[in-house]
Amino acid sequence: MGEEKKLNNTRTTPESYEIQKFMADLVEEGCTHVVLEVSSQAMITNRVDDIKFDIAGFTNFSEDHISKYEHHSLEEYFEAKIELLKRSPKVVINWDDEKVKECYNLLNGKEIHDTGIIRESENINETHLPYVYVREEEIILTEKKTRYMANIDKEKQEITLKLPGKFNIYNSLMAIAVTNILGVDKEYIVKGLSDTKVLRKIRTSTK
């Protein structure tokens, strides 16, 4: 958009009418792509029912949202998560997460791509590497930054993040894969990641 705008939203995914209004405003401003974080709660409360997704990503799965107020079981939570993937013709998954890897067998007829970190101890056939990946020995982690060499379409691109933590490597690999599939120039992908900042303070831990 022409200028930065922020929504006063308390949910990961806003209500359906708020999303539709915001996207309509974006279209009027000439925006062609929208990145939307879709929570499992948004799926079961139908907040994104009328949105046509071009691509969806699934980075990880854990027990964070199992409670009487959210999902009653891991199975229910997982079904809510993969429902978004079922609605998208193209899917990107993190092959380092064992639960997420089940999507290979659950999403028939989908164009599935993957991301991951290749460890030195792993003996992987070079013809079966993820769509976008980084080798563990090519990662440099510090308290304030992360740097690694991403393999994209058999080309190496140096990625620098102003964000610490291994989880941010996984998030950025997903962002690289999605944008590359959508045809975004690699130059813009690299710059976009290097310019990304988190507004809240990040505390590091050695535990």
Image (tube, grey):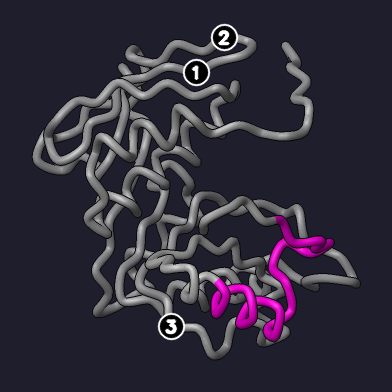
Q: Against 49, is 102 above or below?
A: above
Number of other residues with Cα within 10 Å of mark 2, as a class: few under 14, some 14 to 19, many 20 or more: few
Residue 111 location, quadrant: bottom left
| Mark closer to the chain start, 3 or 1 | 3
State the image coordinates of residue 22 (x, y, percent, origin top left). 62, 73
State the image coordinates of residue 115 (x, y, percent, origin top left). 34, 44
SS at mark 2 in the image: loop
Residue 125 location, quadrant: top left
**Closest to the observer, 51 or 67:** 51
Number of other residues with Cα within 10 Å of mark 1, as a class: few under 14, some 14 to 19, many 20 or more: many
Position of 72 compared to 23: left or right? right
Please name the amino acid that badge 2 sits on. Thr
Q: What residue sits right under mark 3 in the picture?
A: 52
Was residue 19 drawn as part of the magenta stretch in this picture?
A: yes
* The residue stretch that appears in magenta: 6-25
Q: What residue sits right under mark 2 in the picture?
A: 142
Q: Against 150, is 67 above or below?
A: below
State the image coordinates of residue 23 (x, y, percent, origin top left). 55, 75
SS at mark 3 in the image: loop
The quarter in which the C terminus is drawn is: top right
Please name the amino acid that badge 3 sits on. Lys
**Closest to the observer, 43 or 122:** 43
Question: Which numbered circle lies on residue 146?
Answer: 1
